[in-house]
Amino acid sequence: MTLPAETGTEARSQVRKKNILTVRAVLFDMDGTLVDSTAVVEQVWAEFAARYGLDYAEILRTAHGVQARDTVRRFAPAGADTDALTEELGGMERTRTEGVVALPGAEAFLRALPADAVALVTSADRALADVRMRAARLEMPATAVTAESVSRGKPDPEGYLKAAALLGFGPEDVVVFEDAPAGIAAARAAGMRTVVVGDGGGSPAEGLPRIADYTAMAVAVTQDDDGQRAITLEF
């Protein structure tokens, strides 16, 4: 690339630098990270808000990346059966898949990674995760930590720590791909390197590398000096 002579160093500093990460495993959130399910999620929470006269914008602002049960408990009126409401909303989400698609490049990226070095960590329950991944035509990782797998949902780091342990790695060995403030906070609290997907993430995303999608992701699987497998990501 030839830079304008009048800009010199200033122009060179504006050229996007490549990020290179070498890890042993890759952890993914699902909604907004691998799967675009925005239309369905917004539709379901809009119906919930309308039913009880709640602030729809506030629900959306705080619900993303958080277990549905936690959002229902926060916003449902006093005396409501939160377990029944959570199950009802879950049923609505499981039967609505129109518009659910994979993020660009997600399928190729997943296929390029060693299957035993990948885990899904989602606030959805297993049934919904299966529905969404299938609708997006993405293969479900063999290791998946879903809502019923943890005692505390995001932003607690339990899910990410459990996923890394199931794969046999420590927090320092993995990278997390996340899009939501609660999920990013969970990954950072777990002590894991984190890449933000999309243009959101709020304050927890400050200072972190960011991608729009996976179309520019390059993957190389090699062995390090100790003979252990290393996964190098360049983006």
Image (cartoon, grey):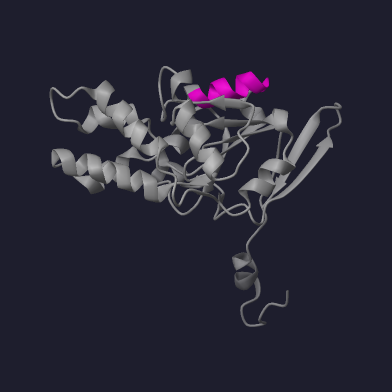
The structure residue drawn at horizontal position 40% and vertical position 49%, both measured from the top left corner, is 38
Q: Is residue 79 above or below residue 66?
A: above
Q: Which quarter of the image is occupied by the N terminus?
A: bottom right
Give the farthest residue toward the front: 95
The structure residue drawn at horizontal position 62% and vertical position 48%, both measured from the top left corner, is 106
The structure residue drawn at horizontal position 26% and vertical position 28%, both measured from the top left corner, is 85
Tell me if I can see residue 191 in this picture: yes
Can you give x and y, in whole percent of width and height, for residue 171 in the image?
Answer: 60, 26
**Total of numbered circles in the picture?**
0
Can you give x and y, in whole percent of width and height, for residue 65 in the image?
Answer: 41, 37
Tell me if I can see residue 61 in this picture: no
What's drawn in magenta, residue-wise? Answer: 159-169
172 relative position to 113: left or right: left
Front-lying residue, 47 or 36: 47
Can you give x and y, in whole percent of width and height, for residue 214 in the image?
Answer: 62, 52
Front-lying residue, 198 or 172: 198
23 relative position to 197: left or right: right
Residue 42 in the magenta stretch? The answer is: no
110 relative position to 53: left or right: right
Front-lying residue, 150 or 204: 150
Find residue 233 and report its image quarter.
top right
Can you give x and y, in whole percent of width and height, for residue 182 in the image?
Answer: 40, 36
Q: Main secondary structure of the magenta part?
A: helix
